Image (cartoon, rainbow, N blue to C red):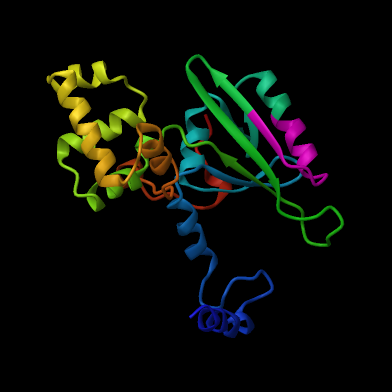
Amino acid sequence: MLQTAESGWNSGAAQMDSTGVRAGIGRPHLMRVFDEIDYGMLIIDPQGGILHANHLARHELARGCIVRSIGNCLLGSRTAFTEQIQEAIESSFRGQRKLVMMHVDDRELSLAFTPLSHPLEADAPSVLVLMSRQSSCDNLAVRMFSRSLNLSRSEESVLVHLCRGLPIGEIARLHGVAESTVRSQIKTLRVKAGASSIRSLLQRVNSLPPVVPALRIIAPMSHNATEFSHP
């Protein structure tokens, strides 16, 4: 079976263009794929100019709380953030991977800078900037996970609250039930998920694929980086 799958993949290799994209899959298709990933994603040039941003990255830039786009360049909302970003960009174009962590009040955003080309390669250099996901409970896959386990609405709600870090007493208060009821629901959750503890249950949730909830897509937006709404 593995050999058959590999043969099928390799047989299509000749149909791929110089970028490694299989024939029939164009740039608009790939851009839509990026928009369905529940992480903000940016591709930037050596000057910090934004070549592409997926939906969640555009949303984060438009908020302007921690990062923003000014003159189509990636900057921080504070001078210190901008300095961290510029240092990470410079390091990335020297072939190094960098992680930048920034926070304003109770909100935190991490940026992972990854070189997409080697300094000695001839193609135009660029860097992928991957933004942290703010909350695992906002991941649509959590709802899909709940449906696959046939959780009741109350059990699903308990799972979401656990993902948000709420203690059992707070979950019981929000549901208007006794703590013993919530503990019983958590036990049922663990049994259905085959998890030996709450920690292992949450580890499974955190490992789910990052799927963007449809409600977070406000309206179709152009993939042209120059058409961002600047703060």
Foreground pick, 113 / 142: 142
Depth order, front residue of 134/8:
8
Quadrant of res 68: top right
Left or right, 94 with respect to 181, comes to right
Residue 22: where, in percent of width, then height? Answer: 57, 75
Q: Residue furthest right?
A: 120
Can residue 200 be seen here? The reply is: yes
- Residue drawn at x 28%, y 39% is 190
Question: Can residue 71 be seen?
Answer: no
Residue 219 placement (x, y as % from top left):
35, 46
> Relative to 227, does residue 5 appear above or below in the rendering?
below
The answer to if 132 sits in the magenta stretch is no
> Which residue appears farthest toward the top when viewing the image?
105
In this picture, which residue range is highlighted in magenta? 85-100
Pick the front one: 201 or 223? 201
Name the residue: 18% across, 30% down.
184
Residue shown at the point (34%, 47%) measured from the top left? 141
> How many badges with numbers are in the image?
0
The quarter holding residue 121 reads bottom right
Residue 36 placed where, x, y %? 42, 52
Q: Residue 216 at what x, y percent from top left?
A: 35, 41
The reply, left or right, for residue 94 in relation to residue 201 is right
**Going by the picture, which residue comes out furthest to the front?**
196
Q: Give above or below for 77 relative to 204.
A: above
